Amino acid sequence: MLDVRLIRSEPDTVRAGLARRGDDPAAVDELLHLDEQVRVLTARRDSVRAEVRSISNQVGTLFREQRQEEATALQEESRALGAEERDLDAQVESNATALRERLLRVPNLPSPDAPDGLTEDDNVVVRHENFDPDSYAEHQRVPHWEIGEQLGILDVERAVKLSGSMFVMYRGLGAALVRALCQLALDRNADLYEEVRPPTLVKTETMVSTGHLPKFADEAYHAERDDLWAIPTAEVPLTSLGRDEIFAADELPRRFMAHTSCFRREAGSAGKDTRGLLRVHEFDKVEILAYAAPEQAPDLHAEILARAEGIIAELGLAYRVLDLCAGDLGASSARTFDIEVFAPGVDRFLECSSVSWFSDYQARRANLRYRPADGKGTAVLNTLNGSALAVPRVWAALVETYRRPDGKVDVPELLQPYLRGNTVIG
RNA sequence: GGAAGGAUGGCAGAGCGGACUAAUGCGACGGUCUUGAAAACCGUUGGGCCUUCACGGGUCCCGGGGGUUCGAAUCCCCCUCCUUCCGCCA
């Protein structure tokens, strides 16, 4: 959520930011109008309220002094004011609600450092690592769903029987590989990040805090009977973990990580990129996330990116890093680097981590605050996060990259200890 | 799921219609005293919004929402959560 005070004081900055995203800058005028209403009405209500209060105190005094008639007269006067106060208060409420609802649907402003552009074609490739398109042999040019079936480690057919399309089931060492990858990601980040095992069903307000609601309700699974939402990422519970809390400056940054299942309806993407593990409704992911003072944010953004990248690199996979253009940023993000792992079997780069800096956008929604070391009062902090490891696409890239001429799959050394010492799958 | 009791400032805990601008204690912070520390004493001690260059001022917040009243922490209704007991159960 944007700061209304920013909209008020620098409306042109906000308009320009929205325009860079391809959003309608006219939202600003609507917000300014509502904000004006709220403030004017609040001031009037407060002064009427002060009047009522003062009269009521006098009434009390008069009654105590047995001056019944004067007291009764004052009561009459106050009664009319009370009605006015209720009326004004109702107007304040309805305008404030309208303002908030409108504000919740306005995306974050892109960082000035985010590249210009409106579509994914405008994203900037920052670097490629380990990537040589000519280095892959024929035996590596087999899509993971075929490898998975051949080796009995991925059972899409039966997963569909249980849950429908875009659900998958890992078996044998394929299932162990899922666990191994998550365990590896947790262990690599345990030096700084506190491990959290959060609930995966959350309340509406928890989804609102990260920006997943109200705008993107179609993307999430909703258990209507209990009004709970299945989390699309551990970012959701980890961001709300500190909701309504105030952190001391020396407690920051706070770093968290969580391994959870993630659930995504992927509405509107039926039939697109749906083979194998390219796009699934439920998957495992280890997310790393930080609460930071604004001045700490750039370093943390770099840190999270380095960690997300490092694990892909050390697994010996090829990847590239993209700097997302303003128009392709997620609604809550101010700046995002995507890591895309190369999967030779499907011959494509697959997004496997989105490392984002949300400035104070989510923190304001979640009411995450801190006490600045030198300042007075409180300030809204910043949040950042990224996937330390999202299983399906990495799993896919891994079995395709490490497929041998005999069809078996080598296990990278880094993973062997996590895979009961197995060096080969198949 | 059923029954009963509860929810007040960082913590403990009073208040149960009119000086609540929330007592008191503890804690924390600052000061006096002291070679230093402790003790003692004095003072300070939350958050939101609006307004102000600033000092300051106004208003709201006693779990959340509604109601009664001139006036609600206090009375009424609904909800949430906690505790204890019962039932069920990995």
Image: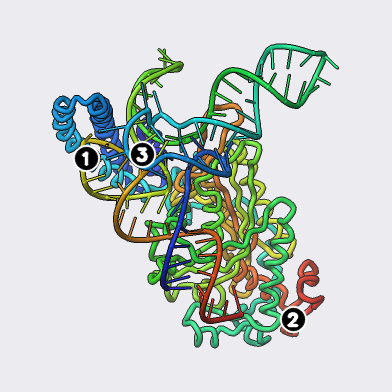
CA gap between label 1 and label 2 equals: 72 Å
Q: Are marks 2 and 3 in contact (CB under 8 Å)?
A: no
Residue A233 point in image, percent of width and height: 53, 62
**Element type at mark 3:** helix
Residue receiving disc 2:
A425
Residue placed most toward the observer, B5 or A20: B5
The residue sitting at 42% across, 74% down in the picture is A270
Residue A250 visible here: yes
Residue receiving disc 3:
A15
Mark 1 Cα shell of 10 Å, populated few (<14), some (14-19), many (≥20): some
CA gap between label 3 and label 1 equals: 36 Å
The earlier-in-sequence mark between 3 and 1 is 3
Q: Is residue A419 left or right of residue B90?
A: right
Question: Taking A3 as reference, is B82 above or below it?
Answer: below
Residue A85 point in image, percent of width and height: 21, 36
Tag 2: residue type? Ile
Question: Taking A159 as reference, is A2 above or below it?
Answer: above
Residue placed most toward the observer, A180 or A354: A180
The residue sitting at 56% across, 74% down in the picture is A277
Residue A328 visible here: no
Name the chain letter of the residue that bears numbered label 1: A
Mark 3 Cα shell of 10 Å, populated few (<14), some (14-19), many (≥20): some
Residue receiving disc 1:
A86
Q: Are marks 3 and 1 in contact (CB under 8 Å)?
A: no
CA gap between label 2 and label 3 equals: 55 Å
Question: Taking A82 as reference, is A187 above or below it?
Answer: below
Tag 3: residue type? Arg
Residue B26 point in image, percent of width and height: 64, 34
The earlier-in-sequence mark between 1 and 2 is 1
The residue sitting at 51% across, 47% down in the picture is A358
